[in-house]
Image (cartoon, rainbow, N blue to C red):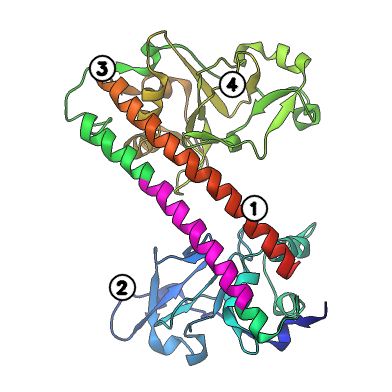
C-alpha cells in the first residue's frame, strides 16, 4: 500500500518556554494553564499539577485545539519520550517546551490520533533512540513517519472502529478502579484507618505475627546466571500492589536456587519491595503481593523481602493492610535514605503495627474481597481480549 509522509499532512508546533519566575500562583483571568509531560497518561490528558503563566507568554498557535496530538518530546527518561494524547475539545490551555503538538491538517484528526497510540509508533520512537543518548524527539523524526494511505472515508471508518475499542477498554479499566475503591471503602467501614486505629483494635507487631522476615540475594554472577527456564526469580519490578507481574520475570537454575535456599519461597508468603523512590503514585518502595505458587518453586533477589506468617494468621488480611493507602503513607514516613532512593530495613517491617480485629470479621471481609476479585477476573479477561484486538487492528492499519 502507498504511504504518505507525516510532514505532508500535519504541522508541528513547539511548546511554550518560560522561566521559574514566570509561573503564577494559580489560575486567573490573564493566565493560561500549561500542560507538561506528567499530564499525559495512558493516552489521556489529566489536569494534575498544572502550572499557569501569563497569556502574553503564549503565541496564538500554541493554544491547544480539538484534534491536536500532545507529545512528550523531551525527558530525562527514555521510556517517557514519545508518549502522546489527543486533545478532545477546544480549550484555553497551552503546553510546555518539553512537549510538542502535532496538528492534523490534511488528514482525519481522530485517525491520526490513533496512530500515536499504536505499538508501531512506540517501536519507531524506541528505534530512533536505541543505542544512543537521545532523550528528545526532533521535528525531523516526526516528519519522517510514513503512514499507510487511506481515503477520507476509510480514515473515518478506521478511526470509529478503533475509538470504539479504546472506549470499551477505558470503561473496563474504570470498572476495575471502582471495584478496588469498593474494597478500600469496605475495609475502612469495618476496621477504620489501620495506622491510626480509631476503632482501638488490639495491635501486634508484624514481627510477632511472623515466622520469618528476610530479603533474598543477588546470585553470584548477577544477570549472567539467569536461564530461559527454571526456578522463578522475583525482582522488585515483578512485585506490584496486590499483584505479581510476570512479563519481565527472570529464572535461575536449581543449583543457584539451592545456594540461596534461605530465601526459597513458600505458598502464601507475602513479598514486599525493599528499595525505591517514594515521590510517585506507583512508588516501587513497599509494594506488596502474595506468592501463591508451590513451596520452594521460587526465590527472590536482594531488593525483595518475604514475610512468612505464623499458622493461623490470615495472610490475605495482612496484605490488605499493607497495600492500603494509609499504610503506603506510613511506609514512606519510616523508610530511610535520600530523595531518589529510599529503603525499608528489616527492623522497620518487624515493627509494623498490625491491627488484630476478631477472626470472624477478618474472614467476613476476605470473603467479600474474594467475591470482588472474581468480578475483577472476569473483567480482566475481557480486557486482555480487547487489548489483543486493539493491537491486531493497529498493526493492520498502521504497521
**Tag shown at residue 215:** none
Of callouts 4 and 1, the N-terminal one:
4
Please state the horizontal and vertical placement of residue 314, each as a whole percent of the image: 38, 17
Residue placed under numbered mark 1 in the picture: 388
Asked if the residue at tag 4 contacts the one at tag 2, i.e. Cβ–Cβ closer than 8 Å, the answer is no
Of residue 45 and residue 279, the one placed in the foreground of this image is 45
Tell me the residue at 72%/69% (across/down): 398
Relative to 116, residue 185 above or below = above
Relative to 171, residue 266 above or below = above
Q: Residues within 10 Å of mark 2 (few under 14, many from 20)?
A: few
Q: Residue furthest left?
A: 199
What SS does tag 4 mark?
loop
Residue placed under numbered mark 2 in the picture: 26
Of residue 160 and residue 80, the one placed in the foreground of this image is 160
- Residues drawn in magenta: 157-178
**Tag shown at residue 360:** 3
**Tag shown at residue 293:** 4
Measured Cα–Cα span from mark 2 to mark 1: 42 Å
Please state the horizontal and vertical placement of residue 72, each as a whole percent of the image: 58, 68
**The N terminus lies in quadrant:** bottom right
Amino acid at each position: 500500500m502507498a504511504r504518505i509522509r507525516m510532514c505532508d499532512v500535519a504541522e508541528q508546533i513547539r511548546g511554550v518556554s518560560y522561566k521559574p519566575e514566570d509561573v503564577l500562583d494559580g489560575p486567573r483571568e490573564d493566565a493560561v494553564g500549561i500542560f507538561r509531560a506528567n499530564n499525559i497518561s495512558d493516552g489521556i490528558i489529566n489536569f494534575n499539577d498544572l502550572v499557569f503563566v501569563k497569556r502574553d507568554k503564549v503565541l496564538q498557535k500554541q493554544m491547544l485545539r480539538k484534534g491536536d496530538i500532545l507529545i512528550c518530546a523531551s525527558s530525562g527518561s527514555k521510556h517517557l519520550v514519545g508518549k502522546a494524547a489527543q486533545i478532545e475539545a477546544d480549550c484555553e490551555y497551552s503546553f510546555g517546551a518539553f512537549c510538542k503538538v502535532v496538528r492534523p491538517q490534511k488528514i482525519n484528526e481522530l485517525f491520526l490520533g490513533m496512530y500515536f497510540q499504536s505499538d508501531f509508533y512506540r517501536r519507531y520512537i524506541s528505534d530512533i533512540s536505541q543505542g544512543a543518548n537521545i532523550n528528545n524527539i526532533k521535528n525531523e523524526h516526526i516528519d519522517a513517519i510514513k503512514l499507510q494511505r487511506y481515503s477520507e472515508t476509510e480514515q473515518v471508518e478506521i478511526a470509529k472502529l478503533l475509538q470504539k475499542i479504546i472506549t470499551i477498554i477505558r470503561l473496563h479499566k474504570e470498572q476495575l478502579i471502582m471495584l478496588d475503591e469498593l474494597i478500600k471503602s469496605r475495609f475502612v467501614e469495618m476496621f477504620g484507618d489501620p495506622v491510626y486505629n480509631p476503632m482501638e483494635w488490639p495491635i501486634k507487631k508484624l514481627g510477632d505475627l511472623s515466622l520469618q522476615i528476610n530479603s533474598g540475594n543477588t546470585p553470584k554472577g548477577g544477570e549472567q546466571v539467569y536461564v530461559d527456564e527454571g526456578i522463578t526469580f522475583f525482582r522488585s519490578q515483578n512485585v506490584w500492589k496486590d499483584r505479581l507481574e510476570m512479563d519481565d520475570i527472570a529464572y535461575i537454575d536449581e543449583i543457584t536456587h539451592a545456594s540461596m535456599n534461605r530465601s526459597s519461597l513458600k505458598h502464601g508468603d507475602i513479598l514486599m519491595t525493599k528499595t525505591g523512590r517514594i515521590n510517585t503514585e506507583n512508588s516501587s518502595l513497599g509494594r506488596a503481593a502474595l506468592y501463591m505458587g508451590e513451596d520452594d518453586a521460587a526465590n527472590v533477589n536482594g531488593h525483595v523481602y518475604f514475610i512468612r506468617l505464623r499458622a493461623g494468621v490470615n495472610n490475605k488480611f495482612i496484605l490488605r493492610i499493607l497495600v492500603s493507602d494509609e499504610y503506603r503513607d506510613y511506609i514512606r514516613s519510616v523508610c530511610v535514605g535520600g530523595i531518589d532512593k529510599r529503603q525499608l530495613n528489616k527492623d522497620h517491617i518487624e515493627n509494623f503495627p498490625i491491627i488484630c480485629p476478631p477472626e470472624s470479621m477478618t474472614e467476613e471481609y476476605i470473603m467479600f474481597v474474594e467475591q470482588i476479585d472474581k468480578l475483577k477476573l472476569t473483567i480482566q479477561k475481557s480486557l486482555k481480549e480487547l487489548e489483543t484486538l486493539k493491537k491486531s487492528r493497529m498493526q493492520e492499519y498502521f504497521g
